[in-house]
Image: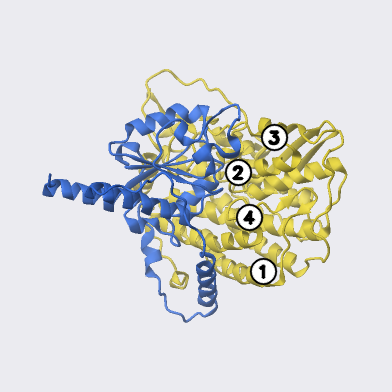
Chain colours: A yellow, B blue
Amino acid sequence: MAKNVVIPIGPQHPSLKEPACFTITLEGEKVVNAVVGTGYNHRGLEKACEARSYLQDIYIIERVCGICSHIHSTTFCQSVEELAGVEIPRRAAYIRTLMAELERLHSHLLWLGIAGHEVGFDTLLMYSWRDRELVLDILAMLGGNRVNYGINTLGGVRRDVTPEQIEKIRKVVDIVEERNKYYVQLALSETTLAARLGGIGKLSHDDAIKFGAVGPVSRAAEVADDIRVTDPYSAYDEVPVTAITDNHADVFGRTVVRVLEIMESVKMIRFCLDNLPDGDIAVKVPRKIPEGEAFVRTEAPRGEDAHYVRSNGTDKPDRVRVRAASEANWHGMKHMLEGDYLADVPIIIAAIDPCYSCTDRAIVLDNHDTGKQSVIDWRTLREYSINWYKARGIDTGKIKIADSHLIF
Amino acid sequence: MAKSLFEKAIDWGRRKSPWIIHFNAGACNGCDIEVVDAITPRFDVERFGLMLKGTPRHADVLVCTGAVTLQTRDRLKRIYEQMPDPKFVIAVGTCACSGGIFDGCYCVAGGIDAVIPVNVYVPGCAARPEAIIDAVVKLLTALENMQKGTPAAPVDDNVADVSALEEIENAVTEASAAAVHSDNQPADSATTGSQGGEE
């Protein structure tokens, strides 16, 4: 009988840029068990929110995650607006939608690069992050900051969009669309990528529902679960949204869903710019919020983001609970990893677009095996996985980039 | 005492190819992504000889982001101890500098300097890649001064200057727009293609 080897990975590993510990049990080269250990990024955000006023909380909530910061603050603001019984102006709703879609653009381009890096296709990392810079410029122009835009406030948005800015956004969106056409083509027709990503990290339609997977992970398994469609918020009741689904139910499917979603976001951004209503950008919200509780769901780039806010009639919330998308997707991780080769582990983990700062709200205690362990860091594992596939004739480093794409 | 050729070579190596390791001590991801951004084509901090490494035993510079949580505190210490001398620490972002908005939370120990000594502080939420590049250059300049024996400029009060960058960014956006819309434009930036080596 083959002897099982237990391999702890992390918490420090350079690829994901965030701490997490995976304990993976191997039988030969096959993963038979996987334990995800998070909690390294737990900062006590929810408690911090209780000690501050609603307006100050927006600042904290925006820093739940540095990638999907806008969607978190949107969700929180919406919860408080619901409690206060305030309806935001249409223009503010459109600006929020515009920011959310721009954020999705940058987040998906970011993921594409990370995925490329994990499979040894570093050229893709450099290209997609180069294109992402253009989107960040726009976000910085609209909100004033590259990462945490700070555009949301209770009752609307803090900054208006000027006609000159709209022209600039159109220009950038054209570029991103042009570039993304190539990524779509690459994802759909590149045989090396299909061989590397196809069939691994399987999470079937039923399993996706069972484990409560959200966002691109569930949509890649044909679960048409998109809050923008099923429970429209902001301006999504007017903006045409198509939930992109795929039937591959594996890492390849998740890639396809994401690149196609970039195309959808581009369409939505154009719609928002064309149909931006006139009017105010914010209404006044009272400092003290009436007693009650609110639960609001939104669609973050990584999937469903849910906030629960309970107020006690003062200017500070009684309880704030954040359920970010990555938190939901961790549950299926064990199932996705089991049965696959060790070489597939980095890309399977990267394919849910994990975001630890979002996730680490609760402290999870794991019983680590006390048996014989060997230690592997993420980088070594990534190199191992690239070489493992190279030995089997799948070398993503050899993918030729189209000449037209070299233009900057 | 004059330095031997060997010592001079080591000094030169330290100055010209500092290897860095990045550790997220409890950041919101914003600064982490900006650190990675700094090595991608627009900012390309690798032109200063920097290389992102996976293990602390190979690294000269520890780039730290985020307020230190109780869970990562000991790990941060361990990573710092594993690094060979001389070692430098750059604290990236307001949280890393002082704890930022998380200071006082029940499981936050404070800024990076609450656990390990810090050489350069880069404020900002999130710190812009330009500020990170500036911090690296200032660290390298201070290192050079130290090696020459001239009094080192104090490295711990660097405030990165990120003004006047919008013009450059606008110029780049315009250039890219022109590039996409004219199909016959020659590929003038071959450098972006060759960047895809080791991160």
Between B190 and A208, the residue placed more toward the observer is B190
Q: Residue A32: x, y in percent?
A: 47, 29
Residue type highlighted by circle 3:
Cys
Task: Examine the image and state in which quarter residue A373 appears.
Answer: top left
Residue found 57% across the figure and 27% down from its top: B107
Callout 2 and callout 3 share a chain? yes
How crowded pointer 4 is (Cα within 10 Å; few <14, some 14-19, many 20+) is rated as many
> What subunit carries mark 3?
A
Residue under label 3: A49
Return the disc, 4 or 3, that comes first in the chain's sequence: 3
Q: Nearer the viewer, residue A341 or A260?
A: A260
* Mark pair 1, 2: CA separation: 26 Å
**Residue that sits furthest to the top in the current view:** A370
Which residue type carries mark 4? Glu
Q: Earlier in the sequence, mark 2 or mark 3?
A: 3
Which badge, 1 or 2, comes first in the chain's sequence? Answer: 2
Q: Is residue A167 visible?
A: yes
**Tags 1 and 2 on a common chain:** yes
- Say if labels 4 and 3 share a chain: yes
For the point 62% across and 43% down, the residue is A63
Q: Are marks 4 and 3 in contact (CB under 8 Å)?
A: no
Parent chain of label 1 = A
Please tell me whether mark 1 sits on a helix, a strand or a loop.
helix
Residue at 35%, 38% (x, y): give it: B55
Circle 1 or circle 4, nearest the eye: 1
Which mark identifies residue A65? Answer: 2
- Graded by Cα atoms within 10 Å as few (under 14), some (14 to 19) or many (20 or more), the crowding at tag 3 reads many
